């Protein structure tokens, strides 16, 4: 349940403009300077600081917008969710440290979880009391989850799980794993897949961190060696959980981190401001080739905003989004990589005598450039998205 | 149909527009004007006193998109925009009614004495040009020396206009001309996006039926992925165009240059790849994709072939 409603939170009936104004004022007033990536006072926030920040956003009515009130949400529409996301995107704040919980596990539990599971898991996700990780990918099953091997075998009122997951973001900090297993054999392909909410402190689970391209240790291999979980950890019947996940994933692909386009805009402003703060970099902004690249990125960001708003409008009108989420995913990931390449080119001119803002920008955008390499891989690679667009949006035949 | 029809939706105009445009394409220039005017297209945004429907630019967008899809060479966009800009002037009524036809020279100015990139000037009565002081001037084409530029399109050339001694029929102040330019960005973006959408549909259809190596070409991953990319560019561009019709969160009009620059680049990409995917056939004059590419490249040239994106970049830098 949501705690007592904060009296400062406006009534949604007051309209999106009121909610927008409230969100803007609250975020601007409460985001600490050292957590603003565009501030010279920035330092990498600790996990506890991020947790506290997101918890305070929730208390302020700026998270869980569309989740049911019965499970701690605000029970509002995607319209208010978009309004808040635009304001979240407009500030250079840290990415959520609980996106798997809020944007994947939570919606799946809402769809297939039992009432007990909903009461147990959902409010704690919103209140930032539990982190979740996503146990889908395996060494031999990345884009092709039909090759999934991690096995769940029923044993009375429990399940015994054996297998290995990889690229599991946040596994070291997670309290639960949204784990995808199979009950049959690999020959069953997409049939017999079963989903669990597995406590990460269950005996038999071993987490081996992986250092990623940006120098961080943000994901891991996770080994499940005779892990036994009660049947109450199961999310839906065999196939049901996975089928729900597919539906949720297609929606999430279109709606998760809805603030991205507005954040890209914010990042571009940060980049230009940093260049303007330094005489040498400022001269680069007079270069026609950089002006053209900046113009191209602005046009792409505008188009991305259009895709996001179009998605919200369609969903509000009751349309199914289906495969159209792939358009948004593919567009934002490539748009951001183009931006990151531009940013890297500009900040590569920073030297020890450059302005403090430029120095800050160099650190930030160099990391962003390397991290952006992941963006066309995770949540379905570019090639998977292109396949989906060709198959399900364009209906292109593979045979006569 | 009147403007009191509150239930009117812009998309409702698409089908009627397509039918009128198809009809117009079978006729001569002046007959086409009458057909398009009779369908309400020339006066869609013109004031009711001028015989128009007084609808917003959102209602003209589906018309522009259909014109692009059908590769209409007749200067419908220019005509309806000038009719709108002229307000309750009797000149507006002549445009809305199809008695006269206006075009727009997108480059140059009256002050320079030279204007260019006007579509269909040889057949039109009037031309709108920038006056060089921020506003616009409607000129009588009979008073202007016209030189056709066939480089991009020998069948439907743009025109250069020598403006010394040109007769000015009407003037637009800076605010009105700026508003008209904004509207033109939206409609041109819609036109080129429509051209891309149509070419993509044609190409996807062809790739689905053209058999090579025992299977349709659309079965080949390289082809499927290219078609998917073309769809992505066209859809994203379309979403951006729709978005710019609305004011921003604070009631301000949105910038149209980024949307037009993106639409021109996306449409050129889709059309070039459409021609490529048609193979040797795509290189022939008979396959009409080149007409659409020529239209897109003419508009692109009018805005400086990439200069628009650079200006968008400068505007953004300035705004920070």
Image (cartoon, coloured by chain):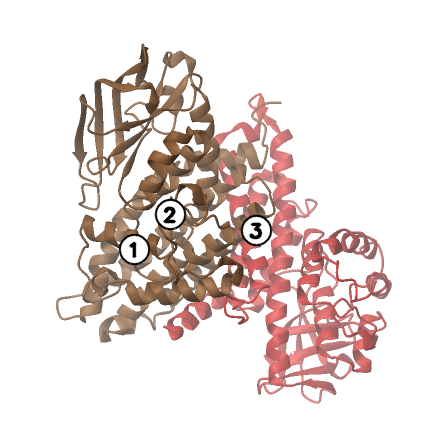
Chain colours: A brown, B red
- Quadrant position of residue B247: bottom right
Q: Earlier in the sequence, mark 2 or mark 1?
A: 2
| Residue A313 numbered tag | 3
Q: Is tag 3's residue or tag 2's residue first in the polypeptide sequence? A: 2
Q: Is residue B12 left or right of residue B206?
A: right
Query: Does A335 appear above or below A154?
Result: below
| Residue A128 picture location, percent across and down | 28, 45
Which residue is located at x 62 percent, y 31 percent? B208
Q: Can residue A351 be seen in this snapshot?
A: yes
Residue A67 in view, yes or no: no
Residue B279, percent across and down? 58, 38
Picture coordinates of residue B224, whole percent (x, y): 52, 34
Discs 2 and 1 carry the same chain letter: yes
Crowd around label 3: few <14 · some 14–19 · many ≥20 (10 Å): some
Please identify, in this view, whether the residue under mark 3 or under mark 2 is nearer the observer. 2
Is disc 3 in the same subunit as disc 2? Answer: yes
Which label sits on residue A2?
2
For residue A176, side relative to residue B63 (left or right)? left
User: In terms of depth relative to the viewer, which is nearer, A256 or A335?
Assistant: A256
* On screen, residue B6 above or below A249: below
Callouts 1 and 3 on one subunit: yes
- Local crowd at mark 2 within 10 Å, few (<14), some, or many (≥20)? many
Could you tell me which chain the residue with mark 1 belongs to? A
What separation in Å lies between label 3 and label 2 (alpha carbons)?
A: 27 Å
From the viewer's perspective, is the residue at label 1 or at label 3 nearer?
1
Answer with the quarter of the image where residue B253 lies.
Answer: bottom right
- Return the mark for residue A56: 1
Screen quadrant of the C terminus of chain A: top right
Looking at the rendered image, the disc whose residue lies closer to the viewer, 2 or 1, is 2
* Chain holding disc 2: A
Q: Secondary structure at mark 3?
A: helix
């Amino acid at each position: 349940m949501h705690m007592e409603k904060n009296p400062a939170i406006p009534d949604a009936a007051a309209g999106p403009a009121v909610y927008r104004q409230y969100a803007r004022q609250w975020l601007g007033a409460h985001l600490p300077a050292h957590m603003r990536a565009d501030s010279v006072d920035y330092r990498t926030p600790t996990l506890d600081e991020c947790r506290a920040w997101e918890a305070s956003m929730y208390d302020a009515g700026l998270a869980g917008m569309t989740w049911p009130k019965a499970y701690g949400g605000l029970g509002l529409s995607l319209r208010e969710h978009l309004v808040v996301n635009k304001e979240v995107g407009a500030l250079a704040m840290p990415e959520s440290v609980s996106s798997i919980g809020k944007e994947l596990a939570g919606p799946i539990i809402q769809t297939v979880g039992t009432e007990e599971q909903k009461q147990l898991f959902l409010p704690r996700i919103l209140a930032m009391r539990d982190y979740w990780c996503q146990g889908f990918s395996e060494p031999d099953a990345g884009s092709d989850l039909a090759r999934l091997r991690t096995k769940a075998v029923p044993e009375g009122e429990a399940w015994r799980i054996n297998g290995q997951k990889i690229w599991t973001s946040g596994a070291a900090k997670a309290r639960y794993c949204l784990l995808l297993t199979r009950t049959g054999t690999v020959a069953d392909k997409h049939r017999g897949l079963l989903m669990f909410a597995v406590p990460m402190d269950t005996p038999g689970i071993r987490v081996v961190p992986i250092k990623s391209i940006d120098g961080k240790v943000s994901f891991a291999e996770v080994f499940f060696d005779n892990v036994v979980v009660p049947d109450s950890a199961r999310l839906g019947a065999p196939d049901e959980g996975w089928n729900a996940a597919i539906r949720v994933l297609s929606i999430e692909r279109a709606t998760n981190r809805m603030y991205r386009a507005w954040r890209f805009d914010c990042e571009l402003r940060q980049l230009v401001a940093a260049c303007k703060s330094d005489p040498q970099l400022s001269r680069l902004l007079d270069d026609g080739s950089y002006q053209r690249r900046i113009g191209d990125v602005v046009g792409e960001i505008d188009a991305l905003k259009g895709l996001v708003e179009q998605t919200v409008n369609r969903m509000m009108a009751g349309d199914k989004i289906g495969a159209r989420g792939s358009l948004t995913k593919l567009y934002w990931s490539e748009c951001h990589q183009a931006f990151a390449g531009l940013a890297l080119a500009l900040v590569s001119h920073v030297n020890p005598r450059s302005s403090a803002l430029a120095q800050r920008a160099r650190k930030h955008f160099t990391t962003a450039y390397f991290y952006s390499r992941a963006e066309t891989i995770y949540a379905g690679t570019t090639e998977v998205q292109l396949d989906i667009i060709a198959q399900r949006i364009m209906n292109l035949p593979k045979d006569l | 149909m009147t403007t009191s029809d509150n239930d009117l939706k812009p998309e409702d105009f698409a089908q009627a527009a397509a039918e009128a445009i198809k009809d117009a394409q079978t006729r001569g220039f002046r007959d086409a004007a009458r057909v398009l005017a009779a369908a309400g297209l020339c006066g869609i945004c013109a004031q009711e006193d001028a015989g128009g429907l007084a609808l917003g630019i959102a209602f003209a967008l589906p018309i522009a998109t259909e014109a692009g899809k059908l590769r209409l060479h007749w200067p419908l966009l220019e005509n309806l925009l000038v009719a709108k800009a002229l307000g309750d002037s009797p000149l507006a009524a002549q445009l809305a009614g199809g008695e006269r036809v206006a075009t727009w020279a997108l480059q140059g100015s009256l002050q320079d004495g030279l204007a260019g990139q006007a579509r269909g000037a040889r057949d039109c009565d009037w031309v709108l040009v920038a006056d060089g002081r921020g506003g616009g001037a409607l000129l009588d084409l009979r008073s202007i020396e016209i030189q056709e530029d066939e480089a991009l399109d020998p069948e439907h050339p743009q025109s250069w206009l020598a403006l010394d001694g040109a007769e000015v029929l009407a003037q637009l102040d800076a605010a009105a001309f700026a508003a008209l330019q904004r509207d033109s960005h939206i409609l041109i973006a819609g036109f080129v996006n429509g051209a891309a959408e149509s070419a993509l549909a044609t190409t996807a259809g062809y790739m689905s039926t053209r058999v090579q190596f025992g299977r349709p070409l659309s079965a080949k991953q390289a082809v499927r992925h290219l078609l998917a990319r073309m769809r992505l560019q066209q859809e994203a561009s379309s979403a951006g165009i729709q978005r710019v019709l609305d004011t921003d969160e604070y009631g301000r009009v949105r910038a149209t240059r980024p949307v037009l620059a993106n639409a021109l680049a996306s449409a050129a990409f889709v059309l070039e790849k459409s021609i490529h995917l048609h193979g040797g056939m795509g290189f022939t004059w008979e396959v009409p994709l080149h007409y659409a590419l020529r239209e897109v490249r003419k508009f692109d040239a009018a805005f400086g072939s990439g200069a628009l994106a650079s200006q968008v970049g400068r505007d953004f830098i300035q705004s920070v």
